[in-house]
Amino acid sequence: MKYYLGIDGGGTRTTAAVSDENGNILLKQVGKTINFYSVGMETARVNLAEIIQGIENKLGKISFKGAFIGCSALDDEADGELTRKLCGGVINAEKLKIHSDVYIALKAVGEAVCPCAAICGTGSMAIAEDENGNTQITGGWGHTVGDEGSALGISLCALRLCCQLCDRGEASPLLDSANDFFGVDDFRKAIDIIYSPETTKDVLAGFAEQVGKLAATGDKTALVIISTEAELFAETVLILLDRVKKCSVLGLYGGVFQHNQSFVKTFSEKITAEYPDITIKLLDMPPEESALELARNL
């Protein structure tokens, strides 16, 4: 039997899918991030190896006819040296290619004129294909200088506000939620936790879920945070849409889009105000399955 491997390497977690030559998905394996900018190349390799080991625990020792990896650390296709650094000695594949995670998301949009995909997970980024088949991107600048609208972006915006509320001695459901999230009774006690090496980006990004829950109850502070971040990311996507001009479908992916309806509503309204005929929807398939299709066509 011929095996194929597709991997979606997001900022928080990595999802791998294995199929046979007929496209039947045999299993999926979830593991830690392989974003080597976030965790370092050595840890990324360890995380990838654990995923492969999980697959082999179920299917036995196998090699792959083709493997395609979408990695959140990349903008474009990886060269041979980077591919060897991440996958050498870890993945046994006849053909192997690594590209960005937004690229495999783009390929999951489905049939469309100049398709576009927008991701709001731990980070945020958008990609589109123009009339000539060339891909263009906006966003993806990382949490230090960008990633508006991402789970981490929402969390950091909310936590900065919590700092101000704490300094002013003001009570707020947002501040209460932050204290619960970090397990403290005074937000200043969260400082050591926030700056602990164990508090990684994906841990901080988890606070976005609490902000989303508050927004769903109608909390005005949380709604402003969600609305602001949604509008900022919509502006990033609109820059891309203005470049490609004729996009008919905008596919959405990532935890923020999948679980925060207030964010989706504000984001979509800002996009459709400029492009009223565009179809905005969640991706037709998970990116790891899109990566599988790419692997079979290597």
Image (cartoon, rainbow, N blue to C red):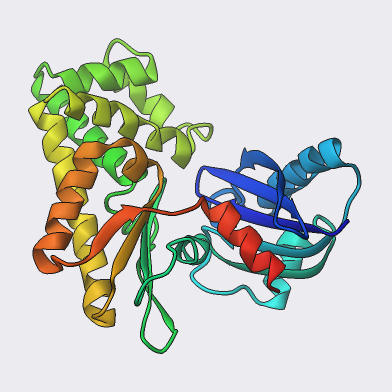
Q: Residue furthest front?
A: 22
Is 13 above or below relative to 147? above
Q: Is residue 56 above or below residue 70?
A: above
Report if residue 284 is visible in the image. Answer: yes
* Rendered location of residue 112, percent (x, y): 37, 71
Residue 81 in which image quadrant: bottom right
Residue 237 on image: x %, y %: 26, 65
- The quadrant of the image that shows the N terminus is bottom right
Q: Work out whether 113 lies above or below 193.
A: below
Q: Answer left or right for 226 relative to 208.
A: left
Nearest the viewer among 185 and 250 is 250
Residue 60 lies left or right of residue 78; in this view the side is right
Q: Is 157 on the left or on the right of 82, as rendered?
A: left
Residue 12, above or below 84: above
Q: Which residue is at 70% across, 67% downward?
A: 296
Q: Residue at x 14, y 44 (%)?
A: 227
Is 13 left, or right, of 136 in this rendering?
right
Q: Residue at x 26, y 33 (%)?
A: 159
Q: Nearer the viewer, residue 138 or 28?
A: 28
Q: Quadrant of residue 60?
A: top right
Image coordinates of residue 149 in percent, x first then y, are 27, 50
Decide if residue 187 is in sight here.
no
The structure residue drawn at horizontal position 58% and vertical position 48%, both measured from the top left corner, is 39
